[in-house]
């Protein structure tokens, strides 16, 4: 599928060895526009928006960072900003730098754990980008939404 030049540039910045050693696309053979469209469809089917998912990740991320590397509880989650890895630019070409700090989170109800970087919170909220399949930090939209407790919505059953 043909994609606009800005997305083509973003895809190049996501390649291994450009901004990061491993890149953002994993083993995904799809173009960036296809990855974005597929995940957008998945999030729509959940009845959610990328902004809602990013906001829920952001709340936990802010709590973790405020705890300076300690583990802190927030609602049904325990979070830790365990790894600070410097800063990097957004591959979509936004000005400025984003922290690569990695947040580790545990859902204390299910025992499930997930991790993401501060940059990813931005990429989910602003770009609807969850990384390519096979990428180290790939987030499956439905799994993230369940983990965060925003899907299914309260009152819709489990
Ligand atoms: Zn951006």
Image (cartoon, rainbow, N blue to C red):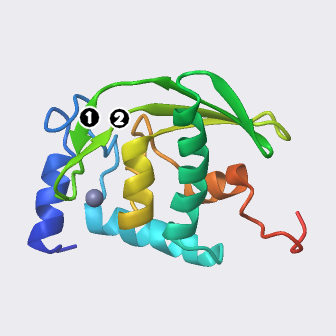
Residue visible at 42% across and 34% down? 136
Residue 63's disc number: none
Residue 87's disc number: 1
Q: Nearer the viewer, residue 106 or 37?
A: 106
Residue linked to disc 2: 100
Residue 31 seen anywhere in this rendered image of the structure: no
Classify 10 Å Cα crowding around label 2: few (below 14), some (14-19), many (20 and above): some
Whether ligand 1 has any atom under 8 Å from the Cβ at mark 1 is answered as no
From the viewer's perspective, is 22 left or right of 117? left
Looking at the image, is 157 positioned above or below residue 28? below
Q: Secondary structure at mark 1?
A: strand
Classify 10 Å Cα crowding around label 1: few (below 14), some (14-19), many (20 and above): some
Looking at the image, is 82 positioned above or below residue 3? above
From the viewer's perspective, is 46 left or right of 17? right
Q: Earlier in the sequence, mark 2 or mark 1?
A: 1
Q: Name the quadrant where ligand 1 sits.
A: bottom left
In terms of image quadrants, where is residue 125? Answer: bottom left
In terms of image quadrants, where is residue 5? Answer: bottom left
Q: CA distance from mark 2 to mark 1?
A: 5 Å
Residue visible at 52% across and 34% down? 65
Q: Secondary structure at mark 2?
A: loop
The quadrant of the picture occupied by the N terminus is: bottom left
Residue visible at 44% across and 69% down? 38
């Amino acid at each position: 599928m043909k994609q606009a030049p800005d997305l083509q540039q973003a895809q190049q910045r996501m390649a291994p060895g450009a901004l990061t050693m491993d890149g953002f696309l994993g083993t995904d053979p799809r173009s960036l526009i296809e990855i974005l469209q597929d995940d957008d469809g998945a999030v729509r089917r959940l009845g959610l928006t990328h902004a809602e998912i990013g906001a829920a990740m952001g709340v936990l991320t802010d709590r973790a960072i405020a705890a300076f590397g300690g583990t802190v509880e927030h609602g049904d989650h325990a979070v830790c900003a365990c790894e600070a890895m410097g800063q990097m630019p957004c591959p979509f070409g936004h000005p400025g730098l984003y922290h690569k700090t990695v947040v580790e989170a545990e859902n204390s109800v299910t025992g499930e754990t997930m991790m993401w970087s501060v940059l990813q919170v931005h990429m989910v909220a602003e770009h609807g980008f969850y990384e390519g399949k096979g990428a180290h930090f790939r987030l499956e939209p439905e799994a993230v939404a369940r983990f965060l407790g925003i899907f299914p919505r309260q009152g819709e059953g489990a």
